[in-house]
Structure formats: C-alpha cells, structure tokens
Amino acid sequence: MARAPDDDLDWDEIVAAMREARRQSRGYATSWEWAPNPKLVELGVTKALAEYLASTEDLSWTSLEAISDDPPDALLVSSRGLRVGVEVTEIVDPKFVAWHRHKKKLGLSYPYHWAPWDEDRLRKSVERSILTKDEKLSERHHLFDQTFVALFTAEPAIDLTLARAAIQNLMIDVNYIDRAYLILSYDPSVDKREFPQGIAALRISLQRD
C-alpha cells in the first residue's frame, strides 16, 4: 500500500511545537511571527522578498541563510554569485505589543484592539527605521555586493493603500543601503500580476550620498 507523504511525521512533536509557539506568541500583529525563534521570522521575510524579486525581476537565487554575526540578518546568493546582505526589521507599535502580552500573561479575556496608523506616522517610522539600519550597516556593508533592508509589518491598520500613500513621495538619503522594501502580510486580495505570491513588497526610494 502506498504511504501518505506525512506518514513519518511525529504529530505529537508537531502539536507540542504548535502549543509552545502559541504560549510564547505575543498575541498581536502575529502574521509574521514564528515563535519561539525570531531568526525564522527574519528568514521568512527574506524568503518572501527573494520570491518577489525572482518573480518581478527575473532574479534567480541559489541560497538563503541566516547570518549569526549580524548585521545584516540574512544572506542571499544569486545564480550569478551576487552576495546580498538583508537586514530585517519590524514596524510595529511596541506599546500595543506590551499591552497584549500583559493581558495574555494575566489570562484575561479582552477585545482585540490595534494601533492607529496614518500616512504621516508610517512615513516617519519607515524613515527612522531605514536611517537607523543605514548607520548599523556602516561597518559591515563592504562584506557584501549589495545590502538590502526589509521592513515588514503585520499591523492590522496598515494596508496596501496606506502603505503606498505613506512612501509615495518619500526619498531617504543613505550611505550604505542599496535597496529598501516595505513588506506587508499575505493578502489573497492583492493583484497577483503585481505581487505573485500575495505578499506586497513596496520599494522605498533611496538616494546614496
């Protein structure tokens, strides 16, 4: 008799891992959250960006790996041997994360509230994050052919319309970053001709000094 592909899976181990992830989850803006290992989040975001670039720019990647001695957080290697360091950071309201964690710790039942975001707040957050990462990459950018920054968010109030408007007229002066993207959570309603994987990745305009 043919065996199902998952016959060899240890379901007790899988269920235990899922329960542990749920236990450690912060309970807010969790679309990109793979608790308890934050490194998996960085790799997941980098993988989403790599797939988007492969689909839209015909780039082919041969490997993706975490960098223990970061920054940056991950290394992408193209089929042409191009080494791209990817620094990953999240845009999230830390006060709302702390609030949800506190409620969860106390075991309280509460309605799900999310942080308010508008164009101005998101624009400032994007600019601040990129400038911080640009400074952080100053001592290691020379180890790579290019350095990218991937800003990701699962904030419920940040949708594609708001994200586009926030970065539309944004131009950030940098010294070490070659590209930067704002990456949203998976959304089945986005135009697959623009975002084939269903994950919006918006390029942020940079100007190298």
Image (cartoon, rainbow, N blue to C red):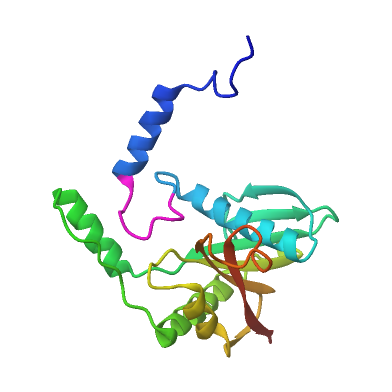
Q: x%, y% of residue 194?
A: 67, 69
Height in image: 17 above or below 1?
Answer: below
Question: Total of numbered circles in the picture?
Answer: 0
The one nearer the camera, 39 or 159, is 159
Residue shown at the point (33%, 36%) measured from the top left: 19
Residue 82 part of the magenta-drawn span: no
Residue shown at the point (55%, 83%) measured from the top left: 167
Residue shown at the point (37%, 60%) measured from the top left: 29
Q: Which of the 4 image quadrants contains residue 175?
A: bottom right
Residue farthest along the top direction in this orientation: 1
Q: x%, y% of residue 60?
A: 79, 55
Left or right relative to 20: residue 102: left
Q: Which of the 4 image quadrants contains residue 172?
A: bottom right
Height in image: 7 above or below 106?
Answer: above
Decide whether the magenta segment is chiefly helix, strand or loop.
loop
Left or right relative to 186: residue 48: right
- In the rendered image, which quarter contains the N terminus? top right
Q: Which of the 4 image quadrants contains residue 57?
A: bottom right
- In the rendered image, which quarter contains the C terminus? bottom right
Residue shown at the point (51%, 47%) measured from the top left: 40
The one nearer the camera, 201 or 40, is 201
The one nearer the camera, 93 or 11, is 11
Residue farthest along the bottom direction in this orientation: 169
Height in image: 178 above or below 197?
Answer: below
Q: Which residues are magenta?
A: 24-33
Q: x%, y% of residue 191?
A: 61, 68
Q: x%, y% of residue 87?
A: 58, 63
Left or right relative to 103: residue 133: right
